[in-house]
Image (cartoon, rainbow, N blue to C red):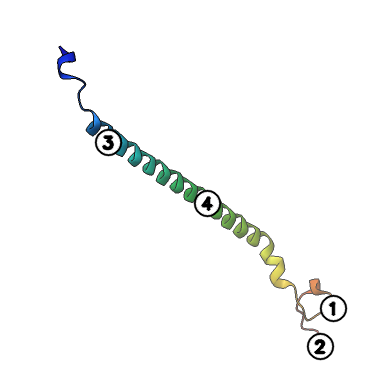
Amino acid sequence: MSFLFGKPDTSAQKAAIDAQNKQLELQRLQIEKQEERQKAEETETAKRMQASARARMRGGARSLVSDEREDAMMGIGTSV
């Protein structure tokens, strides 16, 4: 009997599916951008932590070095 009525109109369904696909694509792109930002933030945090640890390890000797002497490693002295 379907030959009497022809094919059903599915254009509204196709439009709805297309709209859903576009929305899914936008969501996928947003998630990718968010993941990239998160990776960059984690990398930056790791670099800061590494720099902080490096500064703690080397910071003590550096504060004792003086530009006032010929041999900077002799430090600041009170010899006059």
- The residue carrying pointer 4 sits among few (fewer than 14), some (14 to 19) or many (20 or more) residues within 10 Å by Cα, namely few
Q: Residue 3, located in which quarter of the rendered image?
A: top left
Q: Which mark is residue 17?
A: none
Q: Secondary structure at mark 4?
A: helix
Depicted 2 relative to depicted 41: above or below: above
Q: Disc 4 designates what residue?
A: 40
The answer for how far apart the CA atoms under marks 3 and 2 are is 90 Å
Q: Secondary structure at mark 2?
A: loop
Q: Which mark is residue 70?
A: 1
Viewer-nearest of labels 3 and 4? 3
Depicted 54 relative to depicted 33: above or below: below
The answer for how far apart the CA atoms under marks 3 and 4 are is 38 Å
The answer for how far apart the CA atoms under marks 4 and 2 are is 53 Å
Q: Which mark is residue 80?
A: 2
Q: What is the three-letter code of the residue carrying label 3?
A: Ala
Sequence-wise, the earlier of marks 4 and 1 is 4
Q: Quadrant of the N terminus?
A: top left
Q: What is the three-letter code of the residue carrying label 4?
A: Ala
Q: 62 or 7: which is nearer to us?
A: 7
